[in-house]
Image (cartoon, rainbow, N blue to C red):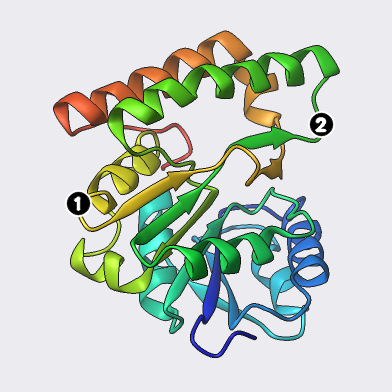
Amino acid sequence: MEEDLKISLVIPAYNEEKYIGACLEYAIKNSSGKFFEIIVVDNASTDHTGEIAKSFPGVRVVREENKGLTKARQRGFVESTGNIVANIDADTQMPKGWVEKIIEEFKKDKNLVCLSGPYVYYDIPAWQSFLVKSYWLLAIPIYWITGYMATGGNHVIKRETLEKMNGFDTKIEFFGEDANTARRASKYGKVKFKLRFIMPTSGRRLTKDGLLKNFIIYTSQFFSEAIAHKPIIKKHKNIR
């Protein structure tokens, strides 16, 4: 482990018994011991998410009874002790080299406060994957204009930056939380969105709601956050 770069991995999980095991297997295997700590935030799950996560040696599970993605991310931040906080989702499958890219980027740029990249989906048809990759290419000019962009389940941020921001905005339940984090972090340094810093994740929401609907939602949420500094959609159906 790099002596001056202690990376805490935080994984929020709400009823993710189907995915959390594979998520942790990939994270442990492909990080080669480079994480300072791994924390799973069991966000009031009613299934076996917590038990599965606890079965992995070296993984700490904390229970957050207040439902909501940002509440879980905030709890993970508070519980963590590393000077870098890496955030992924419970249905991701961390690729080899992901941690090494974090170390490389933060080592070479002292002004970097947040690093993020796109999702790729491991369980959708090839034609949908092509459209998703095209979407990210089209998003890059927007990143150049705004100077920030992030995906919630694939971003890494300095602890001192989160402290200056007063952590994650827990008033946001789901949509727009990543754009909000990136925008606020950009006030304290560089927010880098790197196309090759990818995170494979499940396309279950794309499959359920459709590509077009998802693209419209996430694009509108980003612009709403960028222009009005607040998300358009206030509630999320998984918050009960």
Query: If the image is split into quadrants, where does the C terminus sit?
Result: top left
**In the image, residue 48 lies at what x, y percent?**
71, 63
**Residue 211 figure quarter:** top right
Q: Which residue is mark 1?
A: 187
162 vs 34, left or right, is left
Q: Residue at x 39, y 34 (%)?
A: 175
Q: Nearer the viewer, residue 8 or 13?
A: 8
Query: If the image is split into quadrants, where does the N terminus sit?
Result: bottom right
**Residue 205 figure quarter:** top right
Q: Residue furthest front?
A: 108
Q: Nearer the viewer, residue 192 or 211?
A: 192
User: Taking 89 as reference, is 176 above or below it?
Assistant: above
Q: Secondary structure at mark 1?
A: loop
Which amino acid lies under the numbered mark 2 shown in the image of this protein? Asp
Which amino acid lies under the numbered mark 1 shown in the image of this protein? Lys
Label 1 vs 2, first from the N-terminus: 2
221 vs 69, left or right, is left
Residue 68 visible in the current orientation: no
Q: Secondary structure at mark 2?
A: loop
Do residues under tags 1 and 2 come within 8 Å of each other at their CB atoms? no
Q: Which residue is mark 2?
A: 123
**In the image, residue 128 lies at what x, y percent?**
74, 15
Q: Residue at x 36, y 64 (%)?
A: 74
Count neighbours of disc 1 (C-alpha within 10 A) and say few if under 14, some if 14 to 19, many if 20 or more.
some
